[in-house]
Amino acid sequence: MTYELSDDDDGAPKLTLRVEDTKGDYVILTESEGFDGGGCGGGVGAPPSSPRISGNGRCWSIWWWAKLVLLLTFLGVLAAVFLKWVGPFFMDKEIIPIINWETSTFSTPVLAFLLFASVALFPILLLPSTPSMWVAGMTFGYGFGFLLIIGGVVIGISLPYFLGSLFYHKMQGWLERYPKKASIIRLAGEGNWFNQFRAVTLIRISPFPYVIYNYCAVATNVKYTPYVFGSLLGMVPEIFVAIYTGILIRTLADASHDRHSLSAPQIIFNVIGFCLTVTTTIIVTVYAKRRLKEMQKEEELLLQ
């Protein structure tokens, strides 16, 4: 079997494949004039793909921003409807009775102690402490509410860390059974103090379960100080979102209790605050997940 390259009558290149058999058949492959080698067959020549790629990238970017604007618009309309109609009705039936029971049953110092204890102890029992953060924001606002929550969080992340060390080998076995999920949290135990601090911060920002990581962190051999400081920094966005949610609930409850709806400026202000809070949370979470994946790839390249 031989190949022959020649020119056709019209000047187009012609590739001839000759099969050596009794019949002497020929298979003629003629390259068309418009062929640029960009098909799936992998022809000769590089396709002019740069403008096409640039255009696709620009269209993708515009479509991404359009989807973000549509999402924010939908969330804004949803928040306005909730603030105008759904919120007051829900407040009258559920929230206001709870607030009245809370203020009539507990004094302010006792309530502060109970909230502190719940934020500190609920993670040990694998229970969510976010509702307690809502109440802290609802009752004490950003200043004292933040200090109250952050103090409870220190205990809530420290006790599981030391308790998990008692079951170190069991935690190691759990991580080995789920290598894909464990590959992310293992980053916290790699490198120097700053690398561990950065990895823990990103893990706390990412949607990895809070109470589960409290117990699993010790199995990654992360040191206690970068674990604590990274956890506190990574949980700041979540704490502020919880406090803001509590303040918003309190605002709706006060408006419903006084039997008047929110004014237009109040609705606009709360809708804008809600949209900014959701947008910031999404952006920070996406960045944390992307940065963790980059760190994971860098770690895999170093191990090769």
Image (tube, rainbow, N blue to C red):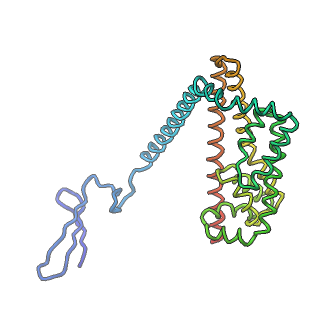
- Image check: 105 left or right of 43? right
Residue at the far left in the pictured view? 23
Q: Is residue 27 above or below residue 245?
A: below
Q: Residue at the spot x=68%, y=61% of the render?
A: 185
Residue 229, image x, y percentages: 81, 52
Q: How many marks?
A: 0
Q: Residue at the spot x=24%, y=67% of the render?
A: 15
Q: Residue at the spot x=56%, y=26% of the render?
A: 81
Q: What is the quadrant of residue 236 in the picture?
A: top right
The N terminus, quarter of image: bottom left
Residue at the far bottom in the pictured view? 22
- Image check: 35 left or right of 220? left
Q: Nearer the viewer, residue 121 or 219?
A: 121
Q: Nearer the viewer, residue 71 or 241?
A: 241
Residue at the far right in the pictured view? 109
Q: Residue at the spot x=61%, y=47% of the render?
A: 286
Residue 257, image x, y percentages: 70, 21
Residue 79, image x, y percentages: 59, 29
The C terminus, quarter of image: bottom right
Residue 224, image x, y percentages: 82, 60
